[in-house]
């Protein structure tokens, strides 16, 4: 069997085959190697000629091609025809692609020709301008030379007249050129020769051989350097450097700026700015910061205009837009339920919503602010309700509810009348200047007395319609549902009078009702939209935090894409937990939101630092002296929502007196973490968790470090426990009970005992364990204890009134006749915080 087996040998030549060539490779140390390289030709596909026929002609061509072509075994006519069609379609596509590429190449070539022509035209105009300027300069120089020659000839005319005859001319009738005429020509020839062989002139494209041999030298000049060189040459040709006209700029000047940044904004050299500062007595480098007043002097010295700006200008993007009257549309009213604790606010709202929120509240009292939307069954309109806590600690929550509301529904229990938090709610409503509707709840009870409620409200300038006033009052019952339609009708009437409108087609603006740190969802804020429409994907800034609306949920837990005016939603996507009561504003870009949030954080930090820095050393010493005898109870507070944490801190700050106080080291929202445990251990403080728990690592760390964790779900219990703990730091109250008096009748000197006073107990009883004071002329001379108390020769525990005894003081012997001994006992009474 041969090596070829009848197969054709591989060749390196042919019409469409590859071509071979030898390439010599060079290596180090003089080594070389010949390598055979094959280059393949590019296959070109000819486009089909037009007019070749279509339709039935194509079918006949395909059939002819199928008949004339070699058909492999097992291929049917239909398959062969299908393959030929595919082949023809591929050829047609290749032809189209080739035509398209050719058209694109033609368009690119035309574009290159056009750009080249424009560039040549520009260079030609530039050369012509340079030549005209150069000709002008040469013309001026020629005129100056002619004037100088004329003056020189006029001065040499008398000398030429004194010569006998002119100089002999050479043969040929031409005058010999003088040396002065030969020198410029020689210089011109040298200059032309030098310009031809100028090494600084750019020679064009960089070749491979030049790059490998390094013929151009090391570092090449940049384009900027070449442009500067051309500019200098052009200025030289035009007769000297041209002074550019200085551009005066409006320089934006913040409160502090670095020297380099100041020079950049003025477009001046940094060295010139540093020099100007030194001339003004300020030694500063380019990286140092100078104040705005110094920078203003430098800017004016350079001739620019100063535009003073402040860091607060970043908030200018939050523009206050005045809505046009034609853009306003009716919106739902916002109703806040307020009143004293346990007067039935949440139960009344549950009866309206047909829900049972109150059953899920710990202790049966509301401790969170809630926002709900309820459809009015009579009118079909939507009502937005805010349910506020009634406990004394939640003053800030009630204040926030009154600030964002349109109507306040004051709930008063008919069996309890007006209470302290009822009065506080009235004051909040008056401060917010919102209309009020009085709902007298629990009217179904036998002991209910609505008339007493109306009478008590008169003391606070609330005159109801029953008393011929202008404040609506409705008798309702949350349990039986009595009066609820009348209450809804009164709310609808009041909302109709207010004519509440808002513009939904603008950037959203709202208020944070509540904020919390959810384990699975991160920071979550309950936002009540007041203006515009909040949409998913909007970028916003709220207080010191910013974020992007990742998702929104309504009061029923359903996902929504947008929220219009008067709609409460839970917003996810914040970078941190905002403060309850912060204002939410939608901005256009994320950079603006981040910049505003960073400015607000820095402003708050500076404010806290300024508050501490403003304290003088004398004030610090005075405070330390005052706090020397004050005991502190440090605590850490973690709560489920921001409003609850705020209420707990305000309640704990009120606990204490001049001798003891509660110090909240840290408070926040979310679960108790290891960081909290570490801080509590360092300060020897307990951690109070309100509706939150510690995670597993925090529990293990607390057990190891001995940190006390306490969990609460009712704010009453938390405040009471802290009061008890703070009461334990109070020093016990010492009371003195006088139990008797004795008069010294005679004194005796006894060896081994000292001076012994013979006494007569005139009043009460004298005890051995009691304390004594020695009185002389009603002045206390000594206070101490008894060393001995004897009756005759026996040591006794006490001596009653009318009997004689002997007394000796501990470490004191200066007793005299007729002195009076006062006998008393001390009683320690444990004190508590009220």
Image (tube, rainbow, N blue to C red):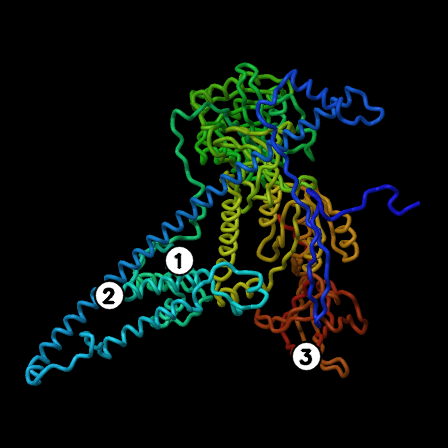
Image quadrant in which you'd find residue 477: top right
Q: How many marks?
A: 3
371 vs 769: above or below: above
| Label 3 CA crowd tier, 10 Å (few <14, some 14–19, many 20+) | some
Quadrant of the rendering where the N terminus is positioned? top right
Report the residue at 71% width, 75% height from top: 810
For the residue pair 717 and 309, the one nearer the viewer reads as 309
The image position of residue 795, as x and y in percent, is 80, 71
In the orientation shown, which residue stands out farthest toward the right? 1
| Label 2 CA crowd tier, 10 Å (few <14, some 14–19, many 20+) | some
| Residue bearing mark 3 | 813
| Label 1 CA crowd tier, 10 Å (few <14, some 14–19, many 20+) | some
| Residue bearing mark 2 | 138
Identify the mark nearer the N-term, 1 or 2. Answer: 2
The image position of residue 378, as x and y in percent, is 54, 14
Image quadrant in which you'd find residue 430: top left
The image position of residue 484, as x and y in percent, is 57, 18
For the residue pair 348 and 826, the one nearer the viewer reads as 348
In the orientation shown, which residue stands out farthest toward the top? 378
In the orientation shown, which residue stands out farthest toward the front? 172
Report the residue at 52% width, 42% height from top: 541
The image position of residue 550, as x and y in percent, is 61, 37
Identify the mark nearer the N-term, 1 or 3. Answer: 1
Find the distance from the CA under tag 1 to the CA under tag 3: 91 Å
| Residue bearing mark 1 | 265
For the residue pair 269 and 315, the one nearer the viewer reads as 269
Image quadrant in which you'd find residue 749: bottom right
Residue 648 in view, yes or no: yes
Callout 2: SS: helix
Marking on residue 545: none
Identify the mark nearer the N-term, 2 or 3. Answer: 2
């Amino acid at each position: 069997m041969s090596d070829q087996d009848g197969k054709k040998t591989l060749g390196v030549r042919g019409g469409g085959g590859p071509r071979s060539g030898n390439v010599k490779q060079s290596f180090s140390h003089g080594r070389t190697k010949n390598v055979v390289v094959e280059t393949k030709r590019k296959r070109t596909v000819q486009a089909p000629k037009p007019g070749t026929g279509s339709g039935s002609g194509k079918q006949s061509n395909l059939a002819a091609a199928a008949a004339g072509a070699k058909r492999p075994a097992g291929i049917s006519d239909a398959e062969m025809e299908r393959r030929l069609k595919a082949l023809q379609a591929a050829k047609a596509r290749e032809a189209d692609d080739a035509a398209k590429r050719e058209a694109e190449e033609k368009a690119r070539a035309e574009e290159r020709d056009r750009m080249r022509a424009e560039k040549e035209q520009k260079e030609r105009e530039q050369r012509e301008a340079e030549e005209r300027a150069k000709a002008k300069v040469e013309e001026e120089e020629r005129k100056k030379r002619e004037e100088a020659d004329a003056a020189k000839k006029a001065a040499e005319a008398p000398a030429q007249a004194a010569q006998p005859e002119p100089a002999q001319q050479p043969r040929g009738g031409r005058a010999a050129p003088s040396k002065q005429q030969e020198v410029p020509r020689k210089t011109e020839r040298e200059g032309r020769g030098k310009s031809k062989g100028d090494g600084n002139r750019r020679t064009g494209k960089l070749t491979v051989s030049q790059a490998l041999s390094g013929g151009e030298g090391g570092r090449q000049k940049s384009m900027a350097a070449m442009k500067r060189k051309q500019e200098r040459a052009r200025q030289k040709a035009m007769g000297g450097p041209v002074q550019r006209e200085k551009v005066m700029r409006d320089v934006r000047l913040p409160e502090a700026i670095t020297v380099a940044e100041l020079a950049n904004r003025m477009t001046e050299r940094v060295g010139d700015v540093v020099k100007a500062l030194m001339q003004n007595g300020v030694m500063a480098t380019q990286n140092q910061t100078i104040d705005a007043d110094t920078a203003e002097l430098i800017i004016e010295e350079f001739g620019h205009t100063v535009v003073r700006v402040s860091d607060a200008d970043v908030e200018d993007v939050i523009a206050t837009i005045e809505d046009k009257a034609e853009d306003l549309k009716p919106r739902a009213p916002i109703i806040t339920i307020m009143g004293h604790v346990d007067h039935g606010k949440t139960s009344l709202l549950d009866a309206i919503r047909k829900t049972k929120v109150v059953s899920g509240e710990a202790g049966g009292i509301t401790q969170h602010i809630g926002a709900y939307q309820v459809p009015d069954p009579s009118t079909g309109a939507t009502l937005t309700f805010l349910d506020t806590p009634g406990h004394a600690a939640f003053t800030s929550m009630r204040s926030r509810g009154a600030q964002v509301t349109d109507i306040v529904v004051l709930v008063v229990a008919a069996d309890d009348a007006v209470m302290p938090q009822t009065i506080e709610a009235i004051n909040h409503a008056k401060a917010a200047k919102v209309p009020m509707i009085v709902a007298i709840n629990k009217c179904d009870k036998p002991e209910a007395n609505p008339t007493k409620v109306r009478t008590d409200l008169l003391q606070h300038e609330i005159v109801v319609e029953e008393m011929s006033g202008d404040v609506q009052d409705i008798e309702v019952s949350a349990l039986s549902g009595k009066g609820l339609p009348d209450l809804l009708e009164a709310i609808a009437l009041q909302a109709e009078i207010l004519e509440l409108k808002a513009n939904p087609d603008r950037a959203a603006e709202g208020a944070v009702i509540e904020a919390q740190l959810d384990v699975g969802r991160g920071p979550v804020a309950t936002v009540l939209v007041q203006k515009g429409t909040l949409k998913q994907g909007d970028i916003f800034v709220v207080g010191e935090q910013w974020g992007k609306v990742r998702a929104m949920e309504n009061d029923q837990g359903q996902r929504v894409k947008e929220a219009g005016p008067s709609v409460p939603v839970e917003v996810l996507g914040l970078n941190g937990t905002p403060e309850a009561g912060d204002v939410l504003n939608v901005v256009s870009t994320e950079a603006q939101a981040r910049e505003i949030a960073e400015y607000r954080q820095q402003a708050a930090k500076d404010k806290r630092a300024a508050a501490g820095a403003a304290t003088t050393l004398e004030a610090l010493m005075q405070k330390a002296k005052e706090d020397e005898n004050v005991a502190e109870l440090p605590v850490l507070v973690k709560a489920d929502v921001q409003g609850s944490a705020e209420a707990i801190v305000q309640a704990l700050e009120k606990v204490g007196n001049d001798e003891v106080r509660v110090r909240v080291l840290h408070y926040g929202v979310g679960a108790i973490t290891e960081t909290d445990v570490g801080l509590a251990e360092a300060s020897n403080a307990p951690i109070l968790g309100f509706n939150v728990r510690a995670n597993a690592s925090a529990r293990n760390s607390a057990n190891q470090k001995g940190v006390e964790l306490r969990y609460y779900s009712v704010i009453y219990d938390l405040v009471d426990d802290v009061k008890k703990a703070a009461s334990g730091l109070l020093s016990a109250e010492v009371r003195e009970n006088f139990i008797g008096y004795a008069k010294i009748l005679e004194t005796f000197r006894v060896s081994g005992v000292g001076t012994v006073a013979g006494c007569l107990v005139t009043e009460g009883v004298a005890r051995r364990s009691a304390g004594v004071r020695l009185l002389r002329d009603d002045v206390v001379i000594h206070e101490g204890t008894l060393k001995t108390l004897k009756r005759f020769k026996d040591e006794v525990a006490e001596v009653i009134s009318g009997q004689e005894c002997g007394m000796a003081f501990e470490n004191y012997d200066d007793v005299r006749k007729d002195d009076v001994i006062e006998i008393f006992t001390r009683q320690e009474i444990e004190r508590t915080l009220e």
